[in-house]
Amino acid sequence: MAPLIPSIQSFFQPEVPPTTSRTPSTISQPTNTTGDGFTPSEIHTALHPSLHAWHPRTTYTETDIGSLVPGPGCVTVMGRVANVYDQVLSSKMPQAAKGCAKVLVKDDSGALAVKLWYAKVDYGLRLGQLVSIWTPHVSNAEAGSLVGRDAVLVTSIFPERDNTCYFLVQEKSDEGVLCKTPLGYRERRLLEGLITLRSYLEGGWEVQGVKVLVAVRSIGGRKKFTTKKGTQTENVSVNVFDDTADAVLTLWGRTSNSASHLKASHTVLLITNPSFKGDRRPTLSLNHGTIVDVDPWSVSICLSLKEVRLKLAGDDQRLMRAVFDLEAISEAQNQILFTLADVDEFVRAAPSEIFSGFLSLTIIELNISALHQRNMLLCTECCGLPVFSNALTTPCKQCSKQLTLRPNPRLIGLLVDETGAIMSGKLIWSDIAWEQLLGRNAEDLAEAAKGNLVLLRYLEQRVLFLKVAVRFGWVPDVGRLCVLALTIV
């Protein structure tokens, strides 16, 4: 009998499923789901790639922007982003650029227009950012091209595809000192083209090369819009001002990312050649020829910066305490008696003079009950916005910082003497003056506001029509009378 030839199935063991019994607790336990094998950091790196590590293959000459010469040559420059706007492309090629960020970079000597092409890398550009650029070629700007008139040179780089160029954002090494001088600045001379905001709004916007120095008062929320071409864009409204007028600066597109890095009541902007629109409220915006210097610095405009910053919210109380010794003034015996007409005449004759004196005023109007009903008995300012409450402490709605409030200056309405009157909210009151007038500090006033309405009405009726002797001080940088101490006659 011929031997049997084994089949290939005989070499494999049959797979028998396990017959173990499943307890109810085993059935109720959830099974572990198998992931895709990627960590969250790897997924974030794939979706938001960073620029590759770059090592130059040749020597790049470090130079200033003002010393650049058109033509081929490997050079590297450093400057700050003075303007940026985006141009989105619709190419479907996998290796093609997805867009071009047109960046205006300036240092202390000049400005350079950079066409920064990108495919996947997001450079996170914003105004005032310190950047370094390596490029093998610089050319003259074409006539009619979308670059500012201060940028006569232009370079085009694509760091993701070209190893001869690179774009670096100096985040960790920026100490806020380099490239802060405005273009056209000369030692011991006024900055050419610098005018007040009011002069700009009243017709100065028609002049080429005009500059306005403004401070950030408050920053609005981010809004999304759909353009006529169907693309999505965002904008942020920034309220700005100087000592002559207020306006709104609108940041569109990429420049709207800069709003989160501006500080209300702190950041100062020097804007050259802004666009103007004055339909309802004066509005400034950026065009391709606008240059924005964030917190500029030079010897000639440092005084202007100081004047603007001193008028920012919250500095009036600090300045009043720094200039006047409140305790010494409250105990002083000899004071010069002024009338409101005398004060007005003295300030107009010597606007830069600091002086103090004595006023005899009558309280004609009080708003304690009205402000209590509106939850505005106490107030302060934060992030450039007023904060009102009947409580002593409250968080800021912008930055969530816990704030300590003071009595609202509008508690006192009209004050008069035989020569004039002072409207509500026009005075800066010290804490000593509030205690001397109301007989209680801010904490006691907040406690009374919780439920003791009878006490607030009694306080209002007792103080109304009182004649008070006000010890005042005048500081030109504040521009308002400071009530240093007070005595009820």
Image (tube, helix red, strand yellow):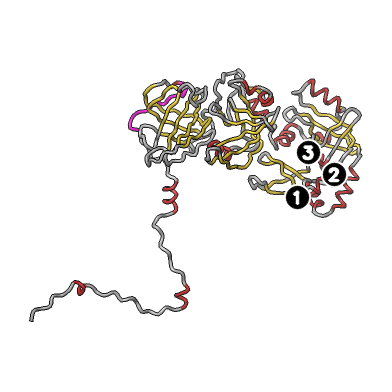
Tag 2: amino acid:
Leu
| Crowd band around label 2 with a 10 angstrom C-alpha radius: few (<14), some (14–19), many (20+) | some
Q: Nearer the viewer, residue 98 or 264?
A: 98
Tag shown at residue 430: 3
Earlier residue among tags 3 and 1: 1
Instruction: Identify the residue at horizontal 76%, vertical 23% (top origin).
Output: 351
Please, is residue 478 above or below residue 449 in the view? Answer: above
Tag shown at residue 438: 2
Q: CA distance from mark 2 to mark 3?
A: 12 Å
Earlier residue among tags 2 and 3: 3
Q: Are marks 2 and 3 in contact (CB under 8 Å)?
A: no
Q: Nearer the viewer, residue 471 or 408?
A: 408
Tag 1: amino acid:
Ala
Residue at the spot of label 1:
391
Q: Please provide percent x and percent y for residue 211.
A: 61, 24
Tag 3: amino acid:
Ser
Q: Quadrant of residue 225?
A: top right
